[in-house]
Image (tube, rainbow, N blue to C red):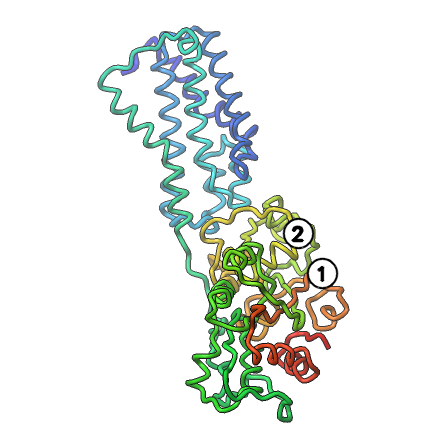
Amino acid sequence: MIRKKNRASFCWLLIRSFVWTPLIVGSVGVFGLGWWWALIPALFLNGLSWHHYNKKYEFKNKIRLEVSTLLIALLYYLGVFVVVMWLFDFNYIEIPELYPLLLVMPYNLASLFASGLALYNNLAWFFIGAFWSAILGVTWDSLSLKHFFKLPRRYRVGFVVLLLVSLAPVYQHIIRSQHYVDTYTSNSSELNLNQYRPFRDDKKLAHLNQPANLKIADHYPRLNGATAAYPIYSAVAQTIYSGLNAKQAAKIIQVGTTPKAFNSLINKKADVVFMAAPSSEQVKAAKKKHIHLNLTKLGSEAFVFLVNKKNPVNNLSVKQVQAIYQRKTISWLSVGGKPTLIQAFQRSKNSGSQTAMEGLVMKGKKMATPMRYQEEDGMGGLIDDVAGYNNNTNAIGYSFRFYTTQMKQNKNVKLLKINGYAPTTKNIRNGKYPFIANVYAISRRDQTENSKRLVQWLTSKEGQKLINKTGYVGLK
């Protein structure tokens, strides 16, 4: 119980704990919402403020009173935050903007930015940091003199509990990074690879109007590649392989992700793979196995950026794209859109589109590490995320033009212009669209004779005609 003579002090300390400390931490540390280290100066100032206050009014014998008020403030702010997070299932986008304004208003700038940009990842650390920095401030003299006030035995368990409570933001981060909110995909087409399988009389595959000059009737080269390139090499096999049925072809012409396809080549389970340029790690993996690679350029393809069709942004500059993926630009407002947080989705490491992103777009600039839910193993999943992550329109992602517009169509996404140029065939050929990726047929240097003949045919007039008919931009 608080005695009468301490009530006035207690009330002033409550005001200081509930208002003064949040004003310091919420204003000076506002950038800590995006970068945790930006919170450090605010916590230092808060600790210094409490130290001077304690020293001025000689609260050395009333530390428990100060701790009590700070603890009440912590339990209130952190409690409100935890309850709101739980009620909205850690879905930042769905949290009403009135929550931080009405319930944690003393944190002013921090609460305003958190609500406007949905930057809630680090907000709990403001409350935890404010508490512990103040505690260090009021015990400053005791620590410097190595004189510690004695904590009653009955409070020691509570102190341990308080330390555990202080780890609440860690738990929040774990839950958030593992949590995934369903996206809406009502207008999304399923990626049906069966329509591209050879020798099934499916009209989806490109074909020549006359028999090809090259025919392979035995010792068929085993083909594999990126999912986006499957229509190319499947059409090639159907055009120049003879004597196969669909079942036999399925064992020879396989399709998988870029990493799996590349591994099949260096492990000698495939003879030719079709994909974008391999990553530096993939090249190292090949050298480690003493595999020498032959890269034959077959054509070009636009590396595209896509957003929800309702997003008012239609064009980005190269620098703006780089800034978004470095997390230097975090709101659509700064690039001509609405004041909402940008959800920048990425692909997994060593995938074809991730390698293209790092090489074509970032060009040595390091990308910000994505949250777990912002990284997709498959291009199809990334497109659906952009179509409506959390039923919202604030996501951005990347892929290849043909895959997005032909293979995995989703009516809820649109392709962005880059530097004012749309990713059209014309702008790919004339080089005005800035992000152009090459498509390669990659084989081992010790390739079979038929593999060599197949690769040579791909660069011939007939081979290039087939690639153009597929929908890619050939060399000729």
Nearer to me, 14 or 164: 164
Quadrant in which the C terminus is drawn: bottom right
Q: Which residue is mark 2?
A: 363
Q: Residue 77, image x and y in percent?
A: 41, 33
Q: In percent of the image, x 36 and y 19: which residue is there?
A: 67
Provide the secondary structure element on which disc 1 rests. Answer: loop
Q: Quadrant of residue 13?
A: top left
| Residue furthest bottom as drawn | 210
Q: How many marks?
A: 2
Q: Residue 304, image x and y in percent?
A: 63, 63
Q: Residues within 10 Å of mark 2 (few under 14, many from 20)?
A: few
The three-letter code of the residue at mark 2 reads: Lys
Q: Is residue 74 above or below residue 49?
A: below
- The answer to whether one can see residue 7 in this image is yes
Q: Quadrant of residue 291?
A: bottom right
Q: Residues within 10 Å of mark 1 (few under 14, many from 20)?
A: many
Q: Residue 160, image x and y in percent?
A: 29, 26
Q: Which residue is mark 1?
A: 434
Q: In percent of the image, x 26 and y 21: which residue is there?
A: 156
Q: Taking 149 as reference, is 250 left or right? A: right
Q: In percent of the image, x 55 and y 76: which residue is there?
A: 448
Nearer to me, 200 or 51: 200
Q: In percent of the image, x 48 and y 19: which residue is there?
A: 47
